[in-house]
Amino acid sequence: MASFQFVIKDAKGARSEGIIKATSMDEAIDKLTKEGGTIISVKSTGEGAFKGKLSLFDKLMLTIYKIRTGVGLKVLVFFTRQLATMFSAGLTIEKSISNLEKGEKNKKFRTVLVRLSNDIKKGFSLSEAMEQHPGVFNPLYVSLVKAGEVSGTLHTVLDELAEYLEKIEDTRRKVWSALSYPIFIICVLAVAVWILFYHIIPMFAKVYENFNAELPAPTLIAIGVSDFIRDNIFFAFLTVLAIFMSFFLFYLTDKGRYLVDRIILGFPVIGYMLKNSIFSKFCRTFSILMASGVPIMETMELVENVVQNAVIESAVRKARVMVKEGYSVAGAFKKTGVFPPTLLQLISTGEETGDMDKLLAKAAEFFEKLVDSVIERLTSLIEPILIILMAGVVGTIIIVIYLPIFNLGLAISSGSK
């Protein structure tokens, strides 16, 4: 007989989880129905948690597949909100997706909707059809839809999912808006430095060569770098490309990703902002999964895949193992040493009161406010800092170029005395 993990609520609304033996999913549902209570979710214990690790080649292929088939979060947010609205209004899932397919402007997503519609016509459930498109619908999305189908609350789950994605998109937009200006300035600085080394320095080098001037060491170094770039531009391009590809492949490895993510979280101000953004996403995801009746072990696995930071993922993975061994959720997270005391206290209180989903939703709002406050401070500080950085780099190169002229002026002035 197979084992099935279930989540049910009794007449008072108290949530309980467990494992039941049955020959099939239908038999497991029948047994739970006879015992009373409302079934929230039923899932084979063979699915979900503790999957094998992917090889580097598999990760590379998966990344390429997601880039090729994926759509933007804004597109998914709009689709989920429209689907929730249509389904709540009484349209069938098949009719709702068919209507959305006709008005979809994104070609890749329209293709996905056509396939979803065809699969549903063949008898697949919505979650089963979505599982065929991992580049668009991640495991979190599919699991929530599946939980809504089993519990008969798909319209509610779709509404909550749409709201969840909108808040995740809003937080992501705020973070990127704070980081876009620094990235733009750094790109402009890189172009300015390239122009100086490729065009300006060679012009001065020819002038100095005609005068047979004795050049100071910093100027000689600058001219040497400029000559190397001009003489080896194709090699320099290949070198930059090789460095980028090496970093990309290094980041795909478990150790490389963990090291890079740890360094990023250690950055002053920016690291603090990203960490709060991750905790906000962690709490928001944990909350909606718990509210939808997803079992705790599967919830922790899905949260691990959603946070998108190797340091936090590793902590959630360790906590998941400890929960399986009998630790409380709060106790397991505390032992990792990664999560802030405020979050741990709310999780502990939620376990005691049975309102973990509500308290985690409050925690998500708290971390979102911290992100907003950091962004306000960052935008006020980053502009003058970047202007000073840009002026310092460009100014230093220009001073190095003009050093021979300064030295000549000093020599003339000292000779006149």
Image (cartoon, rainbow, N blue to C red):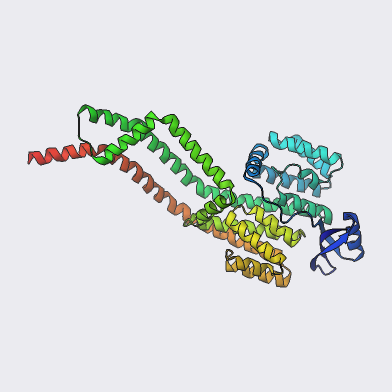
Residue furthest to the bottom in view is 352
Task: Look at 43% across and 34% down and name the residue there.
Answer: 236
Extreme-top residue of the structure:
210
Q: How many marks?
A: 0
Q: Is residue 105 visible?
A: no
- The residue positioned 75% from the left and 53% from the top of the image is 144
In the figure, is residue 210 to the left or right of 135? left
Residue drawn at (82%, 52%) of the image: 149
- Looking at the image, residue 293 lies above or below residue 165: below
**Percent from the top left, x then y, of residue 416?**
8, 39
Residue 134 seen in this snapshot? yes
Relative to 225, is 107 on the left or the right?
A: right
Task: Work out which quarter of the rendered image holds the C terminus and state it.
Answer: top left
- Residue 39: image quadrant is bottom right
Relative image position of residue 399 (x, y in whole percent): 28, 41
86 to the left or right of 362: right
Q: Quadrant of residue 199?
A: top left
Where is residue 312 drawn, in percent x and y?
60, 58
Residue placed most toward the observer, 172 or 26:
26
For image coordinates 53% across by 53% down, the residue present is 259
The N terminus appears in which quarter of the rendering?
bottom right
Q: Position of residue 361 (x, y in %)?
A: 67, 62
Q: Name the quadrant containing residue 333.
A: bottom right
